[in-house]
Image (cartoon, grey):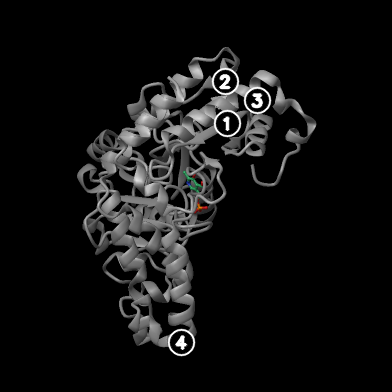
Amino acid sequence: MNLNNIRELDRNDPLAPLKAKFDNSNNIIYLDGNSLGRMPLSVLESTETLLKQQWGRDLITSWNKHQWIDMPSIVGDKIGRLIGASKGQVICSDSISINLFKVLAAGLSVQQERSIVLSTTDNFPTDLYMVQGLTSLLGEQHCQLKLVDEKALEQSLSRDVAILMVTEVNFRTGARLDIGRLTQLAHNLGILVIVDLAHSAGAVPVALDTWQVDFAVGCTYKYLNGGPGAPAFSYVAKRHQTHIKQPLYGWMGHATPFSFDAAYQGSADIRQQLVGTPPILAMQAVNSALEVFENIDMNAIRRKSIALSELFLTLLSQSEHTQCLTCISPYDAELRGSQLSFDYQQSYALCQALIDRGVVADYRDPSYIRFGFAPLYNSFEDIYLAVSEINAILKSDYHLQDKFTVRQKVT
Ligand SMILES: Cc1ncc(COP(=O)(O)O)c(C=O)c1O
């Protein structure tokens, strides 16, 4: 395939015009939207308005006048549309870690006779740490983490498991679990299901309501492009909202925060997941970043994501110099999210050399390089140029220079 064929793919791509909605001024090829999404241009404008007009002039009246108080729900419902959740079930707040703590504790409290939280050895560490933290707080008789390989999940479901806690798309390998099937199997055994959608939201179609997932969490800084450290979200299925109690009793989760009661009375809707004052500046960035998704079907995003990653694999397979990269992501596109990961001893150096030549990917220990595909702003030409650079670097051993082996704090 030559560059002309590739450009033809871009010309025929219905999502191609969306690239102009992002800041692409640095002219790099950005394949790291699975870590931090590019900045939508609308964010600049809307945060400036918020700073100048709302905070600057309207000050405290903005909580009512500009609906600051409702931002967590407004943003939550916008995210909900992208993950198959009808209104009133998603709220934007805190981080994934904190949100997990809340829903784990809430879930365990209604599973009185059971204490096991079943998860996967390869889950994102913070998810596992949250369970370990709860064990130290509640004791092993109330919370015990059990870890199994992703492939052993189904056979490990049993009546002594309280909660199945999984991440839909594996952060290292990009492998995608069948959440609909797992939820059904878990529910048959009375197990509640918590899903981490960090690598799913905005990247793959998710159907939380249809799958009948109980709780979900996710971040907005990856494929939702909400900005570094942007607030996360949580989903609590409507059927649980009136009876579950998350344990971080904050005033924003109170049924009537402005009655300033001394005694906590949790809200009987999704707002119970709130704890403290929402970070309005950061939330406004998420709010306007989500505008890019308006009128866009997640299936169209998925189709392009698969096409981008398949092109990447095809081009990579055509060079003898790239054969040292062992793909650890599923070859079947249906079984992966929107990333490809490769095992290669010199992955760290390769990643740094690529960044040096204007192609951004990232590295994960022990020896994996990850490429994320963000269909809203990645073009087919980006893929072509990225693979050309990988090829050129590996062919010339450009990455074997000492300067590319120096580890930085963030990999
Ligand atoms: C799957 C997964 N879960 C959780 C996190 C971290 O979440 P937070 O920093 O919002 O607590 C990440 C970060 O990349 C992640 O990939």
Q: Are marks 1 and 2 in contact (CB under 8 Å)?
A: yes
Q: Which residue is mark 4?
A: 57
Residue type, mark 1 in image:
Ile
Give x and y (percent) for residue 285. 44, 64
Quarter of the image with the C terminus is: top right
| Residue 229's disc number | none
Per the model, the C-alpha gap separating discs 2 and 4 is: 55 Å
What residue is rendered at 48% in x and 28% in y?
384
207 in relation to 133, above or below: above
Of discs 3 and 2, which sits in the foreground? 3
Per the model, the C-alpha gap separating discs 3 and 2 is: 13 Å
Specify which label sits upstream in the sequence, 1 or 3. 1
Specify which label sits upstream in the sequence, 4 or 1. 4
Q: Which residue is mark 2?
A: 325
What residue is rendered at 30% in x and 71% in y?
267
Queried on whether the Cβ of the residue with tag 1 lies below 8 angstroms from ligand 1, the answer reads no
Quarter of the image with the N terminus is: top left
Horizontally, residue 34 falls left or right of residue 295, namely: right
